[in-house]
Image (cartoon, rainbow, N blue to C red):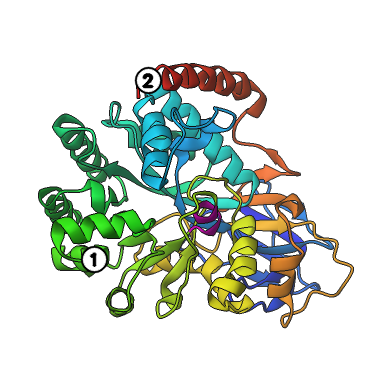
Amino acid sequence: MSLILKNASYIDYASGDITKGHLKVNENEQLPLEFFNESEMPSVSVHDVVVECEGKYVTRSFACGHHHAYSALSRGMGGPLKPPANFYETLKYLWWALDKSLGKDAIEASAYATAIACAKNGVTFIIDHHASPFASVGSLEVIADAFDKVGVSHLLCYEISDRDGEKALNDGFDATAQYLEKNQGLIGLHASFTVSESTLNRAVQMAEKYNSGIHVHTAEDIYDQTFTMQNYHKSVVERFHKAGALQFAKTILVHCLHLNDNERKIIAESPVYVAENIESNLNNNVGFFNGRGISKKVMLGTDGMHSNMLRSLKAAYIIGQTSEQLAMTEACERLNRTHEYIASNNFKGDAANNLVVLDYASPTPVTRDNYFGHLVFGIESADILHVIAKGKIIVRDRKLLTFDEEAVSKKLSDTAASLWYVYKKQKV
């Protein structure tokens, strides 16, 4: 079965080149998109789906370079259990308290909420960083199943950390190994200041065993650097580099706000990628991202704040003009660079048959030379009419086809209420 997009204006996501005509999309990701000019219609079988796209724009769907699905049900939950004096206490009294409250039902509901939001925002590939220290084993399988049912592809990891004791630590490694035996994924670590030397070395050995990489928060707050320097006599990136975590092209360093020049040099000379999460950084008051020296390795994430990559793009560009003199073209390249990361590491699920159809009524022309300007200042998630994942329509006329949103909405609400109750009962 194939999908035919009639009379489409296809925009190459990397170059901005526009091709008008009919577009044939295959479910097999090994097959390329097929273009036909307006005078020739491809042969259509009774099994094919034809969608009229006259006046619409078609382009590559989006991929999120760093997400936290586990935080999806925190909206409206209330603030930290105790007013935080700094970022460390925000983690301790909010996010670590939340992840300790997660059981299987809450993990599943969070995954569905995230996948649905991503799909409707045109995000068809999610790189996620999960944490549930008292319900870790099997948690990645639960998330993967929910993502698969909604129709979005994924690259998952479990956030291994020493912060919750030896059992939680070992369970995190077990959860990771169990998942990687059958699935593509990464080895997740929380951050340098919650990871001992033995845990870091063990994670690197696991990455070598499974031909994977490390997905880790890196110098998000100055506390991470201060703690690491005091306890390990190296900066965060220098520590990871010495341990071998930066040898893997699949490694993702998240945030990277408080870096010295040597750390930037190490990253630039390594095969790793950096995930920028500018809105989260501002919300947590930890500083401004600056891609100086490493900009060609930077991709965009949301850090769980939302599931809208167009929003992340606009924030990265507008704020980046001040923090790093960021050019519009580079901001758009960061949006697209997650595709580069996925493809260069041969992960599945993000081929050319992942597309969005935009009902974008611009008052000005859209051309190859100004497409990035439209992407930053014009196109919104509300303009996403259809979403195609792995050659199949999963959102049509802004309605999710793969999953009954109405049926799941009450369950999500009830699960959130139960989660909030457990969260608020914790002692501080």
Seen from the viewer's position, the closer of residues 320 and 23 is 320
The residue to which callout 2 is attached is 426
Seen from the viewer's position, the closer of residues 408 and 42 is 408
The span picked out in magenta is 277-282
Residue at the spot x=21%, y=32% of the render? Answer: 168
Q: Is residue 43 left or right of residue 94?
A: right
Residue at the spot x=55%, y=17% of the render? Answer: 414
**Residue 254 appears at what percent x and percent y?**
38, 58
Residue at the spot x=71%, y=57% of the render? Answer: 357
Q: Mark 2 or mark 1: name the one nearer the start of the chain.
A: 1
The vertical placement of 37 against 147, above or below, is below
Seen from the viewer's position, the closer of residues 343 and 201 is 201
The residue to which callout 1 is attached is 235
**Residue 353 appears at what percent x and percent y?**
56, 59
Circle 2 SS class = loop
**Residue 121 appears at what percent x and percent y?**
64, 49
Q: Residue furthest front?
A: 85
Look at label 1 and name its amino acid: Ser
The crowding category of the residue bearing disc 2, from other C-alpha atoms within 10 Å (few below 14, some 14 to 19, many at least 20), is: few
